[in-house]
């Protein structure tokens, strides 16, 4: 199922104005395509690109002239664009009921509702949709799922797995050390350039979600690993001069061709070292971020500082980690206090 001009315009808005990552924009696009597929089947309308574009043009013209978007009976619409623009809460509920029959989890349902909520908020603001059908749609209650963190001993095993005798091994160790030392996202890691490394200040300049920037400190182990990697990289004749030179805009962590690594490549490297270290294969780069936050709180860091380091916009997002630390304290108490458990 292809996209429509109206949904294409929305995904452009997500990328250009909201500065969503390509991955997040793709997820929203996939959810919208599923909505389009449902409407196509429900109303039996064949998608004709020219007709869909003309329908969007008419809606934009109505907005430009100050005329309200006309309310249209969906059964009399001739394009999916018109059906989308005039959808009611009943239309949305039918779509959600269809999803419910496919046994999606509450978390997946919540994400799809969030996609439609963002889409119709945008469409109403642009005047493309007469009303927002999502105002009366509630998000299903989800069970609280705690982020996964691994122990310091497991971290040590993982970080010692990469070799130190070649550039790529040193790069991998430097990447893993950096992920755990800073708590940055893997997308932020692969986006780092040479200019983002502040060796004298022992810090990284990170561009996060929504192009928001922050400074994160680098621990001594991560700093040493990066320096050892760069030392060998810049002396290795197998890499092109561009990869070896300290050009500000060049990627800090390069692939075997001297170019920028992808997030997927980092995940593959992590999988390799998890297997080598005999660790759980479900550990992800994000697990290192969770472990970073949990270990800081375990050792007395205040929540606001951890929020800043993680680049969370809302403190409530960071507070989920306090449940992990409280859980650990409870376990330690139950295990250690002589009157914690009934005899």
Image (spheres, rainbow, N blue to C red):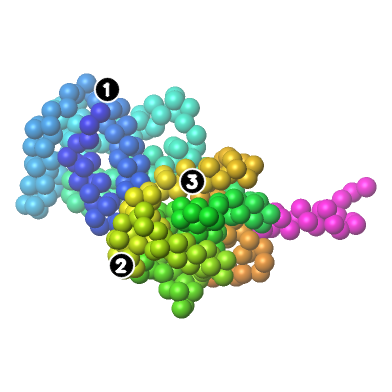
In space, the residues marked 3 and 2 are separated at their CA atoms by 25 Å
Q: Position of residue 171 (x, y in %)?
A: 47, 56
Q: Position of residue 61 (x, y in %)?
A: 7, 47
**Which residue is more in the foreground, 324 or 78?**
324
**Disc on the earlier residue, 2 or 1:** 1
In space, the residues marked 1 and 3 are separated at their CA atoms by 42 Å
**Disc on the earlier residue, 1 or 3:** 1
Identity of the residue drawn at 46% across and 55% down:
167
Query: What secondary structure is found at the residue carrying circle 3?
Result: helix
Q: Which mark is residue 269?
A: 3
Identity of the residue drawn at 57% across and 60% down:
293
**Which residue is more in the foreground, 327 or 126?**
327
| In contact (CB < 8 Å): disc 3 and disc 2 | no
In space, the residues marked 2 and 1 are separated at their CA atoms by 54 Å
Question: Residue beneath label 2, please?
Answer: 247
Few, some or many residues within 10 Å of mark 2 (<14, 14–19, 20+): few
- Dot in front, 1 or 3: 3
Q: Is residue 288 magenta?
A: no
**Disc on the earlier residue, 3 or 2:** 2
- Above or below, 78 against 307 in this view is above
Query: What secondary structure is found at the residue carrying circle 1?
Result: helix
Part of the protein shown in magenta:
323-343
Task: Specify the quadrant that holds the N terminus.
Answer: top left
Identity of the residue drawn at 17% across and 35% down:
82
**Which residue is more in the foreground, 51 or 274?**
274
Few, some or many residues within 10 Å of mark 1 (<14, 14–19, 20+): few
Q: Position of residue 51 (x, y in %)?
A: 9, 32
Question: Residue beneath label 1, please?
Answer: 41
Can residue 319 be seen here? The reply is no
Q: Position of residue 96 (x, y in %)?
A: 39, 32
């Amino acid at each position: 199922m292809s996209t429509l001009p109206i949904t294409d315009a929305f995904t452009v808005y997500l990328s250009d104005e909201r500065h969503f990552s390509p991955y997040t924009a793709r997820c929203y696009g996939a959810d919208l395509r599923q909505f389009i597929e449902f409407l196509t089947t429900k109303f039996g309308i064949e998608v004709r690109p020219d007709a869909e574009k003309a329908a969007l043009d008419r809606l934009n013209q109505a907005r430009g002239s100050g005329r309200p978007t006309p309310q249209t009976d969906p059964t009399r619409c001739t394009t999916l664009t018109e059906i989308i623009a005039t959808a009611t809460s009943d239309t949305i509920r039918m779509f959600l009921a269809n999803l419910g029959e496919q046994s999606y989890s509450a978390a997946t349902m919540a994400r799809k509702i969030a996609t439609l909520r963002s889409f119709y908020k945008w469409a109403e603001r642009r005047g493309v949709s007469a009303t927002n059908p999502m105002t009366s749609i509630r998000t299903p209650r989800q069970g609280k799922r705690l982020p996964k963190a691994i122990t310091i001993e497991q971290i040590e095993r993982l970080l010692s797995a990469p070799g130190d005798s070649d550039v790529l091994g040193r790069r991998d160790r430097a990447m893993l050390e950096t992920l755990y030392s800073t708590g940055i996202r893997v997308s932020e890691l692969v986006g780092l350039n040479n200019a983002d490394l502040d060796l004298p200040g022992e810090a990284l300049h990170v561009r996060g979600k929504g192009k928001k920037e922050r400074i994160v400190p680098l621990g001594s182990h991560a700093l040493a690993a990066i320096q050892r990697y760069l030392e060998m990289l810049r002396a290795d004749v197998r890499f092109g001069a561009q990869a070896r030179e300290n050009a500000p805009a060049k990627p800090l962590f390069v692939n075997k061709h001297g170019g920028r690594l992808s997030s997927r490549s980092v995940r593959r490297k992590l999988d390799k070292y998890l297997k080598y270290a005999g660790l759980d294969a479900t550990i992800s780069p994000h697990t290192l971020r969770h472990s970073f936050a949990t270990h800081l709180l375990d050792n007395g860091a205040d929540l606001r500082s951890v929020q800043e380091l993680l680049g969370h916009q809302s403190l409530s997002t960071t507070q989920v980690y306090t449940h992990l630390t409280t859980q650990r304290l409870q376990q330690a108490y139950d295990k250690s206090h002589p009157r914690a458990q009934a005899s």
